[in-house]
Image (tube, helix red, strand yellow):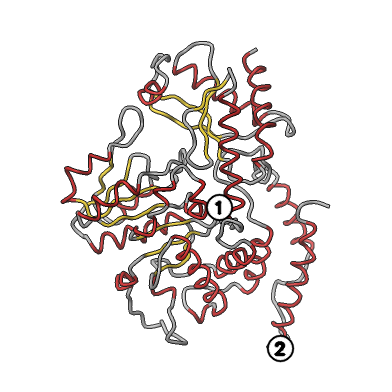
């Protein structure tokens, strides 16, 4: 039995019961819903084309932030999508709107927001961050929005969309951030973005150290925890626990359930500590009407149409995996152990160097070249990256490449000659719990293919 076959009867039974609900409204002639040879042919073609994907489901895939959703999530999504509710307003999806509120409530309590707050699901972290920056601009319309050089590029891009000045907090030669660069600009900055789990290396930025200065200056703090947010659950077991412990002091927080929340793409979320920011979303349209006085999610969102199926899937998943240490936290602890364990395995090797110790579950590393030159690091890293993809499926791997400024690289590894402007090194995202059991095998595969690459 394959990994999905066991779940098919569950989905089939649920779809039949949904059809029983549909027939209460009377039988109708449905156009285009009959099984035809053409549909079967198209599905067969789709099946073959989907095989062109990399094996995101398998632990040998440690490339980007990709993994299949939990079976309960895709079953729930498929069920809801046959109804196709729209969570823009309550009358577009009464049950799924309520599910969204319940799920977002759990996220708010997870980050430590008490009492009233404002929040909803989005189609992803990009739109969630756009909403946070939109509110930041409305509150401080003449001031800059600042983020570190390691922050996701979406912040700079969204500031262009919002026609708001952006200030990049620069990096030191060794790659650390010059946070004191804020000191000379505090009067001109309205909001600072702090990233809890950078997209590149999973770095947790020093929220606890920055909060007092920023709050005293009247500056809003937005936390981009699109990747790292769920690690709040296991903060006591993280080396960065001091920063997670003050997460609730942020004015807004973005978290992506489609990353560590086991959800299908796209499912992001935005939380605002002060519900009063809802005033910035007010609108008046001649075709908007409401079926109750309850909170309408479309009234607190820049997005209009949003898939109710995403809310159903996330709500169901949280029923199975509550946001606790012994719920979803079990998965998160496993991914951190995988990254730490992989780090230790490569540290013991005389053929690999780790770029730095991981904060969460992303590790960067590189094979040691025969020539101690930055260009040689790039060459051997790219060869190993490609060798893993081209190898037999049962002996290969799928990594990603990470570009580092040569000055930064040589600050960490001064024995290398900076003969090029950048170095390309290897990067692994160990975000599947299966990775913890696979790291020994992955390390062996890396060494085997490296040896054949250098022959």
Number of other residues with Cα within 10 Å of mark 1, as a class: few under 14, some 14 to 19, many 20 or more: many
Q: Secondary structure at mark 1?
A: loop
In the image, residue 418 sits, relative to residue 236, either above or below, namely above
| Left or right, 286 with reference to 93 | left
235 sits left or right of 54 in the view? left
Residue 254 appears in which quarter of the rendering? Answer: bottom left
| Image disc number at residue 260 | 1
Question: Residue 134: x, y in percent?
Answer: 31, 61
In the rendered image, residue 180, in percent from the top left (x then y), is placed at 23, 39
Label 2 neighbourhood size at 10 Å, few (<14), some (14-19), many (20+)? few
How many numbered marks appear? 2
Q: Quadrant of residue 307?
A: bottom right
Q: Residue at x 47, y 26 (%)?
A: 424
The residue sitting at 46% across, 61% down in the picture is 269
- Secondary structure beneath dot 2 equals loop
Image x and y of residue 86, in percent = 53, 73
Q: Nearer the viewer, mark 2 or mark 1?
A: 1
Counting residues from the N terminus, which is met first, the one under dot 2 or under dot 1?
2
- Quick check: marks 2 and 1 in contact, CB under 8 Å? no
Residue ID for mark 2: 26
> How many angstroms separate mark 2 from mark 1 (CA)?
42 Å
Residue 194 drawn above or below residue 451? below
Q: Which of the pair 190/288 is nearer the observer?
A: 190
Question: Quick one: which residue is furthest to the right in this view?
Answer: 1
Q: Left or right of 320: which side holds 121?
A: left
- Give the vertical position of 148 relative to 6 (above or below): above
State the residue at coordinates (15%, 51%): 187
- Quick one: quadrant of the C terminus? top right
Residue 271: x, y in percent? 41, 63
Q: Which mark is residue 27?
A: none
């Amino acid at each position: 039995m394959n990994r999905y076959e066991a779940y098919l009867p569950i989905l089939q039974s649920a779809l039949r019961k949904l059809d029983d609900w549909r027939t209460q409204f009377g039988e109708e002639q449905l156009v285009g819903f009959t099984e035809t040879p053409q549909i079967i042919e198209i599905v067969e073609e789709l099946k073959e084309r989907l095989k062109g994907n990399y094996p995101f489901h398998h632990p040998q895939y440690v490339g980007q932030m990709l993994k299949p959703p939990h079976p309960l999530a895709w079953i729930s999504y498929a069920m809801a999508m046959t109804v196709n509710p729209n969570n823009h307003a309550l009358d577009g999806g009464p049950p799924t709107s309520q599910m969204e509120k319940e799920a977002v409530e759990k996220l708010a309590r997870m980050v430590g927001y008490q009492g009233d707050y404002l929040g909803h699901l989005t189609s992803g972290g990009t739109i969630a961050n756009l909403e946070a920056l939109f509110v930041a601009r409305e509150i401080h319309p003449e001031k800059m929005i600042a983020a570190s050089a390691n922050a996701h590029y979406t912040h700079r891009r969204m500031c262009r969309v919002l026609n708001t000045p952006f200030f990049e907090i620069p990096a030191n030669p060794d790659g650390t951030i010059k946070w004191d660069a804020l000191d000379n600009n505090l009067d001109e900055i309205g909001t600072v973005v702090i990233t809890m789990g950078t997209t590149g290396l999973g770095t947790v930025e020093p929220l606890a150290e920055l909060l007092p200065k920023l709050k005293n200056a009247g500056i809003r703090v937005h936390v981009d925890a699109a990747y790292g947010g769920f690690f709040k659950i296991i903060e006591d077991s993280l080396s960065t626990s001091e920063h997670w412990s003050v997460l609730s002091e942020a004015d807004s927080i973005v978290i992506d359930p489609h990353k560590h929340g086991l959800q299908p793409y796209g499912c992001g979320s935005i939380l605002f500590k002060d519900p009063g920011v809802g005033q910035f979303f007010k609108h008046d349209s001649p075709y908007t009407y409401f079926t109750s006085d309850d909170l309408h999610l479309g009234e607190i969102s820049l997005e209009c149409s949003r898939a109710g199926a995403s809310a159903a899937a996330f709500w169901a998943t949280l029923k199975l995996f509550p946001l606790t240490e012994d719920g979803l936290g079990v998965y998160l602890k496993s991914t951190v152990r995988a990254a730490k364990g992989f780090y230790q395995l490569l540290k013991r090797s005389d053929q690999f160097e780790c770029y730095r110790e991981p904060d969460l579950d992303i590790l960067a590393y590189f094979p040691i070249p025969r020539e101690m030159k930055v260009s040689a690091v790039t060459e051997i890293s790219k060869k190993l990256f490609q060798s893993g993809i081209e190898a037999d499926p049962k002996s290969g791997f799928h990594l990603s490449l990470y570009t580092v400024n040569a000055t930064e690289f040589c600050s960490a590894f001064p024995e290398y000659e900076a003969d090029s402007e950048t170095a390309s090194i290897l990067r692994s995202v160990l975000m599947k719990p299966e990775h913890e059991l696979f790291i020994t095998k992955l390390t062996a595969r890396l060494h085997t293919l490296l040896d054949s690459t250098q022959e």
